[in-house]
Amino acid sequence: MRDGRMRSREVQSRSRSLIVMAKTILFACLFGLATTAADAADGSTLFRLFLIDGTTLVSFGEFARLDDRVIFSMPVGGTLEQPRLYVVTLRASHVDWKRTNQYSSSVRAQWYSETRGEEEFQKLSTDVARVLNEVALLPDRHKGLEIAEAARKALIEWPRAHYGYRQSDIREIVALLDESISDLRASLGITSFDLSFVASTPDEVVTEPVLGAPGPADELAQVFRVASLTERANHYGRRCAPVDAGGATADPARNGARLGLLRSVEARPPIGDQGGGIGKHFRG
């Protein structure tokens, strides 16, 4: 009789602990909403192609890699909201793909955090709190352990599938859930050490700061880079080489030539204008 009362108190204590944990997780996630909201994005998403020579080219939106070519829309002039876009085709061998793909992942992560990230994280946290509450009230502790371990597996996989969003919070939730699972295992007399607790921890998703929109000088520099890499190099190269040497200087003639080149590019029909098209723009 006495043993029965002790077991009943233990079960009630574990249930209370799980319920408190569920409420704690839910509160922590809701509190995080106010402290991790991302700044609003300026304009459309800007990607970058990192070239093997160490320079970069801005892509307005996602670029496309087709066989040995990469195609993207390069902004030259206009405004951030309504840029003048030119289709550029380069050889894929010009691109440092490891660096480019790493940066692209960071751009996508920022986009996700500014659009759907918080909403989906709140749904996850609510689901976890609900599951822990159900586990606390289940009379079948074996079933409760199974549900808790399934919830842990889902949490482990979440950051990688969601661009690393709130991954530090996920690790904290997993640590709390591990305590609950350990208690359930102990109550069932399971004393073996579960290696999955060590082997299955959330992987760190590495991101980096996303660069801002290019200024006029950056756009001008891009025109010269593209001209040197595409089939227009023969046409523009003779004008670019003497003008671009040393960059902008106090020489009005040299700087005027640089601006003239930019205007000649801007004068071409951008994407969407009559007469525009890949054949009208930069191809390499």
Image (spheres, rainbow, N blue to C red):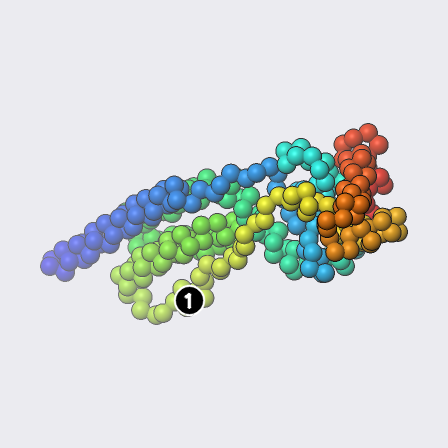
Q: Is residue 203 above or below residue 214?
A: below
Residue 37 at x, y = what percent?
Answer: 44, 42
- The structure residue drawn at horizontal position 61% and vertical position 54%, both measured from the top left corner, is 103
User: In which quadrant is the N terminus drawn?
Assistant: bottom left
- The structure residue drawn at horizontal position 66% and vertical position 34%, both measured from the top left corner, is 79
The image shows a total of numbered marks equal to 1
Q: Is residue 93 above or below residue 253?
A: below
Residue 192 at x, y = what percent?
Answer: 34, 70
- Left/right placement of residue 1 relative to residue 149 reads left
- Residue 231 seen from this side: no
Return the residue found at the far top.
Answer: 274
- The structure residue drawn at horizontal position 80% and vertical position 51%, both measured from the top left corner, is 243
- Left/right placement of residue 107 relative to residue 39 reads right
Query: Which one is nearer the viewer's eye here, 207 or 28?
Result: 207
Residue 256 at x, y = what percent?
Answer: 78, 43
Name the residue type under label 1: Val
Query: Which one is nearer the viewer's eye here, 232 or 91?
Result: 232
- The structure residue drawn at horizontal position 45% and vertical position 62%, both measured from the top left corner, is 200
- Residue 198 seen from this side: yes
User: In terms of image quadrants, where is residue 33?
Assistant: top left
- Left/right placement of residue 156 relative to residue 65 reads left
- Label 1 secondary element: helix
On the image, numbered disc 1 is attached to which residue?
A: 198
Q: Residues within 10 Å of mark 1 (few under 14, many from 20)?
A: few
Return the residue found at the far bottom.
Answer: 192
Q: Is residue 54 above or below residue 274?
A: below
- Left/right placement of residue 79 relative to residue 15 reads right
User: In terms of image quadrants, where is residue 259?
Assistant: top right
